[in-house]
Amino acid sequence: AQRVTQPEKLLSVFKGAPVELKCNYSYSGSPELFWYVQYSRQRLQLLLRHISRESIKGFTADLNKGETSFHLKKPFAQEEDSAMYYCALKAGANNLFFGTGTRLTVIP
Amino acid sequence: SAVISQKPSRDICQRGTSLTIQCQVDSQVTMMFWYRQQPGQSLTLIATANQGSEATYESGFVIDKFPISRPNLTFSTLTVSNMSPEDSSIYLCSVVIGNYEQYFGPGTRLTVT
């Protein structure tokens, strides 16, 4: 069965510090992984997906199949990065399985 | 991209009653999804709603409790029937555009007293 684990419910970092939000997954098939973000009073939106291997708003995430991880990283956190972050795994046609989320707070 | 609206944005309902949530998309989409996010929990898929066919429910969710309509390619409704306090959640509508990008509505915050 598929599972997405985000071990940290809350994460606080100082502005300008590096940030890493952890995500581990369990899936027997070929994984397709995503990071979604929800800013205060806004709807959930896609931040990035592993297939595109792109950097969005300074964030990157590399799929590590050996460690079954898809951690989200940013070298220098900004105050506007404060939000709820969800790691998600696509299983089957279009089903997305979400982790429990990590609330990131960037301290000025 | 897709713009999704949901009605109502929030509601407070008495136990035993039913609430129908509407989801409107600004473009035609094949697949629509309904998710639930209980307090402090992650998003859980309730069902997939395809136009012209019955919705497909995930384990733990049944049609009698969560009937879904999908009359056309831009609209869907989810009804939460015979509500109990455990149904207090945020209910989200979602669609897939293209091969991968999933867009979410703003959610409907339901409180059952």
Image: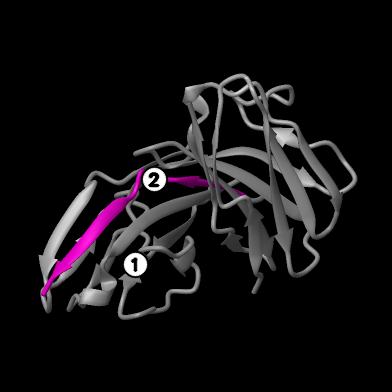
- Res. A81 image quadrant: bottom left
Q: Are discs 2 and 1 less than 8 Å apart at CB?
A: no
Q: Is residue A1 visible?
A: no
Q: Residue at x 78, y 55 (%)?
A: B75
Amino acid at dot 2? Gly
Q: Nearer the viewer, residue B14 or A75?
A: B14
Chain of residue at mark 2: A
Location of mark 1 (residue): A61
Q: Could you say where residue B9 lies in the image, as x and y percent from the top left?
A: 56, 52
Amino acid type at mark 1: Ala
Q: State the count of labels.
A: 2
Q: Chain of mark 1?
A: A
Task: Give the structural element (helix, strand or loop) at label 2.
Answer: loop
For the stretch drawn in magenta, what is the main secondary structure? strand
Label 1: state its secondary structure.
strand
Would you say residue B28 sits in the magenta stretch? no
Q: Position of residue B88 (x, y in %)?
A: 48, 32
Q: Residue B39 vs residue B85: left or right?
A: left
As drawn, is B79 to the left or to the right of A4? Answer: right
Residue B91 appears in which quarter of the rendering?
A: top right
The part of the image, by quadrant, that contains residue A11 is: bottom left
Query: What residue is shown at x 26% (from left), y 55% (from top)?
Result: A103
Residue holding disc 2: A99
Segment colored magenta: A95-108
What's the mark number on residue A9? none
Q: Residue at x 19, y 75 (%)?
A: A77
Using the image, determine if residue B31 lies above or below residue A47: above
Q: What residue sits 21% from the left and 78% below the top?
A: A78
Residue B37 at what x, y percent from top left? Answer: 47, 41
Q: Looking at the picture, does residue B71 appear above or below residue B5? A: above
Let me know if residue B22 appears in the view.
yes
Residue B26: percent from the left, percent from the top? Answer: 74, 69
